[in-house]
Structure formats: C-alpha cells, structure tokens
Image: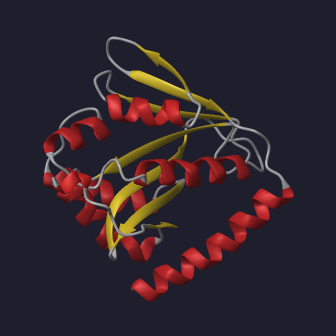
C-alpha cells in the first residue's frame, strides 16, 4: 500500500502558543518546495522561513496545529485582513492560510484545521473569511469548496470567501473549553 494511503493515527488539532515556536519552525522547514510556493505564493529560503516562524508566533491573529504522534504536520493561521473595529480583535474580515506536509495530506488535517479557524473567526466577530492561493493549488481550492466557500479564480491567484454566521453562546462556550484544553496540551508537550 503506498504511504499516502495508509491510515493515519488520530490527529490532535489544537491552538498554538509561543511555546510551540520550535514545532512551527520545524514544520515550515520540512515543507517541500511546491508546498512552500503554494503557501507563500512564491519561493522562500530556509532563513526566510525561520524569520517567518518567529514573526508569526508574535503576530496578530491565531495559529492552530495538526499533530500526529506529537509532531506538527499541519498548520492553520488566522490573521486580520483589514483595519479592525473596536471590540473586534480580528476585524470584520480575516484571512486564513494552511500547510499540510506532503505524505500527511488527504487524511482530514486541512479540513480539521479549517474547522477550528472558522469557529475561532466566527467567535471573534469575523464575518468574511478569505483564503488566497495560487490558481494551480487545486487541493486548497477543493478544501475551500468542501467547507462551503465561494471561489473566484483569476490568472494570478484564487480567492475563496466564506461568509460566517454570528457566534452563539454555545460556540463561545465550546471554544473556551477547547482552548483551555489546548493550552494544557501545549504545556504538557513543552
């Protein structure tokens, strides 16, 4: 059976914290050139990826990781896309970005990360969530369609847009419980 078709162990999807910096950097450095280009819409050197990992952990927004056997194999980022409004830490529009290492794709990691990002964005007042990718990045476009995003493909990029519902007391409660558990897992991993 080819390695991509073997069943994967159950992933742990959790929010990332500053103590996860080394795992984020290692994940980004393991990305093959095509995945790097697909995520960053161009080529990046190892040094540039190290700087990005350092800055991303300090930047505005949230990061989520997909761990398999304790190793970060997928990364989802949620960042503000516009000037924020008072009381809305991300603003009304935000952007999401994803990477899943080759060999760990097609096992639901991207979809699980997308789900966590959608919930986090919704609970922070984001109404419009966008994912940009290169026009040839069919896996990302397929993932966006799978979660109900509308897709606009232009010659230079594709933009997936998802209009989010307002948060509910249940969605806020669920995220607070899961967030506390995520932080406990991060401390245990450190």
Vertical order, 30 against 136 (above or below): below
Who's the residue at 43% across and 43% down the image?
97
Who's the residue at 31% across and 70% down the image?
23
Q: Quadrant of the N terminus?
A: bottom left
Q: Residue 123, percent across and down? A: 72, 52
Q: Quadrant of the C terminus?
A: bottom left
Vertical order, 5 against 138 (above or below): below
Vertical order, 175 against 140 (above or below): below
Q: Is residue 11 left or right of residue 122?
A: left
Q: Is residue 44 left or right of residue 117?
A: left
Q: Residue 147, percent across and down? A: 56, 37
Q: Residue furthest front?
A: 1
Q: Residue 30, percent across and down? A: 18, 58
Vertical order, 71 against 31 (above or below): below
Q: Residue 80, percent across and down? A: 56, 43
Picture quadrant of residue 43: top left
């Amino acid at each position: 059976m080819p390695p991509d078709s073997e069943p994967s162990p159950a992933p742990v999807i959790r929010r990332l914290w500053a103590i996860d910096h080394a795992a984020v950097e290692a994940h980004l450095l393991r990305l093959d050139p095509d995945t790097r280009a697909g995520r960053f819409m161009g080529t990046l050197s190892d040094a540039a990826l190290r700087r990005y990992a350092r800055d991303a952990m300090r930047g505005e927004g949230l990061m989520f990781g997909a761990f398999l056997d304790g190793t970060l194999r997928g990364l989802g980022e949620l960042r503000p896309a516009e000037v924020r409004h008072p009381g809305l830490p991300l603003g009304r529009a935000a952007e999401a970005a994803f990477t899943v290492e080759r060999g760990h794709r097609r096992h639901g990691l991207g979809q699980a990360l997308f789900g966590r990002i959608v919930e986090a964005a919704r609970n922070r007042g984001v109404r419009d969530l966008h994912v940009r990718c290169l026009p040839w990045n069919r896996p990302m476009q397929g993932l966006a369609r799978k979660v109900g995003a509308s897709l606009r493909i232009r010659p230079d990029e594709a933009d997936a847009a998802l209009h989010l519902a307002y948060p509910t007391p249940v969605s806020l409660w669920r995220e607070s419980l899961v967030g506390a558990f995520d932080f406990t897992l991060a401390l245990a991993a450190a």
